[in-house]
Amino acid sequence: TTPTAIYIRGSGFAGTANENRTDFLAAGKASVYVAQHQGMLQWYYGADLDLGSYKLGKWDTAYTFLVTGYPPANAKILDSYSGGHVFGGAGFSGGVNGVIPMGQGEWRFLGIETNLHREFGDYLSFRRKLADTLTGYNVRQPFFGTAGLTTEFVFRTRQGNFGFRFAGGWVLGSNYRNTHVYDSLAGNALRYGGYGTFTWQYTTGRYTVYFQTETASKAFSYHLGFTYRLSRPKLPAKHVLTREELLERFRNRPWPPGHRPPGGRIDDPTP
C-alpha cells in the first residue's frame, strides 16, 4: 500500500582480500535512498558514501613457496609498504525487481542491481605510485562498478517482517576481468569475475536491521547494518465517494436470492 518511501542507512563492514587473504579492511557506509513500487514492479535508487581503512599485510612466503616452489618476487620490498591506508568511495546504487504475493509475504523473484562508485583516499594514491615491477597486478583507476541478479523472500508476522536475499553478479569493465596475468597459486589466469552475497533482514515499524556476507575472487567480507524509514510513507490520496458513486455501488451489489434491499427499491435506498 506504500508507493514511495525514503530511507537512511548506516552499516559497518570488514573483510579480507588479496593473495591468501593477507590484507584486511574495515569501513563504515552511509546511504540515503528512495524505494518505490507500482503493480508487480519495485525499484530503489540512492547515494552511498564509504570511509575506512585498508591494511596491507605481509606476504606468507612459506605458503607461497610450498604451493609454487619459489618465493614471491619482491616480497621484502612489498612488506615494507605494509600497514593501514585510508580509502573512501562515493556513488550510486540502485535496482529493480518483480514481485508476487506468497502466503503471508512476497517473493521478489527476479531483480537487477548495480553499484557505481568512485574511489578516493590514500590507498588509491598508494596504488598509483606503486611501480609495476613490484606487483603482479595493480588497478589504478578510481571507478569500480558491479551489476548482478537477485532473488528475495519476505515473510510478514505480527512482530514484524523478516526475509532472505541472494545475489550474484560481475565487476564492470575490463580492469578486473582481462588482467593478462597468470595466477600461480590458482594455476590459471587471474580474473576478478564475480561476487555472491547472502543477506538476512528483520523489520519492525520504521526500523530494519540486516546482516550480509559477501564473497568474491580473493576477497570476503561481512556487513552489519541498520535502516530507518524517514517520516511517514506517501500513501495514495483518499477519494471521497459522491452520492451518485454510492448509489452505483449499491445497485451493483450482488444481493443474495430472495433478499429485499432496504427501502424496497434498488434505485431508492434508505440511509
Image (cartoon, rainbow, N blue to C red):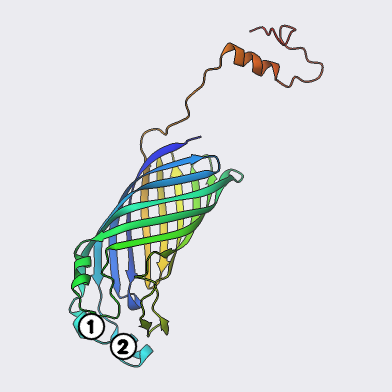
Classify residue 173 as left or right of residue 261: left
Identity of the residue furthest to the bottom in this view = 69
* Residue 85 seen in the current view: no
Provide the residue designation for mark 1: 133
Q: Is residue 235 above or below residue 128?
A: above
Q: Position of residue 254 (x, y in %)?
A: 73, 22
Q: Amino acid at mark 2?
A: Ala
Crowding around mark 2 (Cα neighbors within 10 Å: few <14, some 14 to 19, many 20+) is few
Mark 1 vs mark 2: which is more N-terminal? 2
Q: Is residue 182 above or below residue 90?
A: below
Q: Residue at x 31, y 88 (%)?
A: 62
Q: Quadrant of residue 129?
A: bottom left
For marks 1 and 2, give the CA distance.
22 Å
Which numbered marker is on residue 62? 2
Classify residue 191 as left or right of residue 59: right
Q: Nearer the viewer, residue 106 or 251?
A: 251
- SS under mark 1: helix
Classify residue 198 as left or right of residue 224: right
Classify residue 147 as left or right of residue 132: right
Q: Nearer the viewer, residue 117 or 99?
A: 117
Q: Position of residue 34 (x, y in %)?
A: 39, 42
Q: Amino acid at mark 1?
A: Thr
- In the rendered image, the quadrant that contains the C terminus is top right
Q: Residue at x 56, y 17 (%)?
A: 241
